[in-house]
Amino acid sequence: MNKGIFYAIGAYLVWGLFPVYWKWLNFVPALQLLSHRIFWSFLLMIIILIVLKEGKTFLSIAFQKHTIKVYSIAAILIGINWLIYVWAVTNDHIVEASLGYFINPLLSVLLGVIFLRERLRIWQWVSIGLATCGVAYLTVTHGKIPWIALSLAFTFALYGLVKKKAPLNAEFGLTLETGILFLPAAMYLVYAERSAQAAFLHHSLVSDILLIGAGLVTTIPLLMFSSAAHRIPLSQIGILQYLSPTLQFLLGVFVYHEAFTLSKFLGFCFVWLALLIFAVEGFVSYRSKLALAGSQ
């Protein structure tokens, strides 16, 4: 198997199994979980940079005005995304969270049209229309907007849009993003400790290991994804990315027994059909470009 495909599958498997990890820590408040995720991720990235002897390079290019501005926006977006996701999982909304990541690729394409003036092909517009119908149907049948799904989709799509303008590689970028959030996260953990709300060192050795491990499960799939993106075509990544929300959906329905009514199923069907059309159209378009390039 191509190493790139291996790394991509590994990253999406880890992301797909995230609900299991956060469910083990569902006694910890979401904001505290987020703070641990940021705190330990930053420390781990610093260690990685030291081991790779890239610390000086990072310091020489990271702290420029434009770079700090871009990554501050990215850090806020990914911080909000992580907080909503952890809260959703620990409060039994895994299925709706998976919907957000099903919608995300389509939303990313739409943002490309709005902000980058990219042009969509007809079947891409059809996909976006079907997904919109699915969200509208779920809103009408349940009497409320699926805010968890939409919030996760919008924050991650906007994060991806910002990262398109980001000058640093994946390792440096993640270090800077978590570094920007590190001080607020550390301050909150100190506050939680002083107000007797802290989970770390106050429950069990297993929970302490899992909280520290939050940094590992955050950084490893991101680094694997970065390696995959350099080795395989985006068309393959585009197809493999649906592995993650599919696993999350299956966990929510069959392992954690979240309610999945007929009306929810119909709403999801709109989105799944949209993604099927989107994936097939993207694959066909990619093969056509390859064939055209080969004939020239």
Image (cartoon, rainbow, N blue to C red):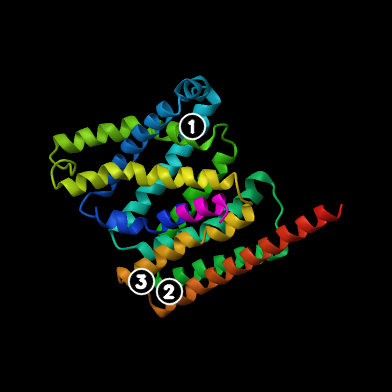
The image position of residue 164, as x and y in percent, is 59, 40
Residue drawn at (47%, 58%), measured in percent from left and top? Answer: 101
Q: Position of residue 251 (x, y in %)?
A: 36, 66
Q: Name the disc covering residue 253, or none.
A: 3
Callout 2: 10 Å neighbours few (<14), some, many (20+)?
Answer: some
Image quadrant of residue 22? Answer: bottom left
Viewer-closest of 290 and 180: 290
Between disc 2 and disc 1, the foreground one is 1
Q: Is residue 258 visible?
A: no
Residue 147 spot, x, y in % from top left: 41, 59
Q: Are marks 3 and 1 in contact (CB under 8 Å)?
A: no
Q: In the figure, residue 178 lies in which quadrant?
A: top left
Front in this rendered view, residue 142 or 259:
259
Query: Which residue is under mark 1?
Result: 172
- Cα–Cα span, label 3 and label 1: 37 Å
Marks 3 and 2, the one that precedes in the sequence: 3
**Residue at the spot x=25%, y=56% of the render?**
24
Residue that badge 2 annotates = 264
